[in-house]
């Protein structure tokens, strides 16, 4: 019985000491060089005639906030160790998912109408890493969200933009500091 108690004490101690060590991984884990301390995100500009007012300002602020919340980098106005700038180069609504429109009139031909609409936003990003030059890129990031064709774009636009921006910002983050 004393061997059994000793084994239980040993397991409890191993469990306690094993749990006291900090985790060595991170689900957000970025691969930032130690010498990179700052990031500057320049104001993005709108390079298309479509889109809601101030969409570029909204995107820029969300991108800055994301880096501030998810990295140890200080956000500075200019000349950061990491620099991001760019433009919204695409904002389009297109029909998708055609469905037949049968008016129940046997003399009328079937016509196709869009069952859903798709909002697509495309953002061009220039990334400069002054610490690791081989990480620089100039790349386009695109994302879309679908909505019911019977809904007005103005009714769902803010929600769709939130969804699209969230994905694009995550993709930019992964490409720049998460090294995915």
Image (cartoon, rainbow, N blue to C red):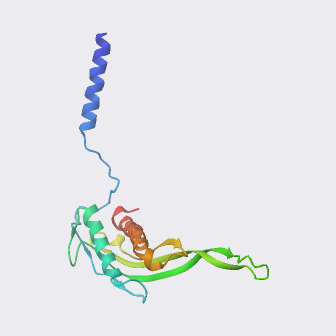
Where residue 48 appears, as percent x and y from the top left, is 42, 88
Seen in the picture, residue 100 relative to 5 is either above or below; the reply is below
Where residue 114 appears, as percent x and y from the top left, is 61, 77
Instruction: Give the residue at the far right of this rendering.
Output: 107
Q: How many marks?
A: 0
Seen in the picture, residue 53 relative to 29 is either above or below; the reply is below
Where residue 29 appears, as percent x and y from the top left, is 33, 56
Instruction: Give the residue at the far top of this rendering.
Output: 1
Q: Can residue 84 be seen in this view?
A: no
User: Which quadrant holds the N terminus?
Assistant: top left
The one of 82 and 19 positioned closer to us in this rendering: 19
Q: In the picture, residue 69 is in which quadrant? A: bottom left
Q: Is residue 16 visible?
A: yes
Q: In the picture, residue 155 is in which quadrant? A: bottom left
- Seen in the image, is 116 located left or right of residue 20? right
Where residue 110 appears, as percent x and y from the top left, is 73, 79
The one of 134 and 27 positioned closer to us in this rendering: 27
């Amino acid at each position: 019985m004393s061997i059994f108690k000793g084994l239980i004490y040993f397991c409890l101690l191993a469990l306690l000491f094993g749990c006291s060590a900090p985790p060595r991984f991170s689900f957000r884990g970025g691969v930032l060089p130690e010498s990179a301390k700052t990031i500057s995100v320049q104001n993005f500009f709108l390079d298309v005639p479509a889109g809601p007012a101030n969409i570029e300002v909204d995107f820029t602020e969300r991108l800055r906030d994301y880096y501030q919340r998810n990295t140890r980098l200080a956000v500075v106005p200019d000349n950061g160790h990491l620099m991001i700038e760019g433009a919204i180069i695409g904002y389009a609504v297109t029909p998708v998912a055609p469905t037949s429109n049968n008016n129940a009139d046997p003399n009328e031909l079937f016509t196709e109408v869009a069952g859903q609409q798709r909002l697509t936003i495309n953002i061009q990003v220039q990334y400069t890493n002054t610490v690791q030059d081989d990480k620089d890129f100039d790349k386009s990031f695109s994302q879309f969200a679908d909505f019911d064709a019977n809904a007005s774009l103005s009714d769902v636009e803010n929600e769709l933009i939130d969804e699209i921006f969230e994905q694009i910002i995550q993709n930019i983050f992964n490409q720049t500091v998460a090294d995915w």
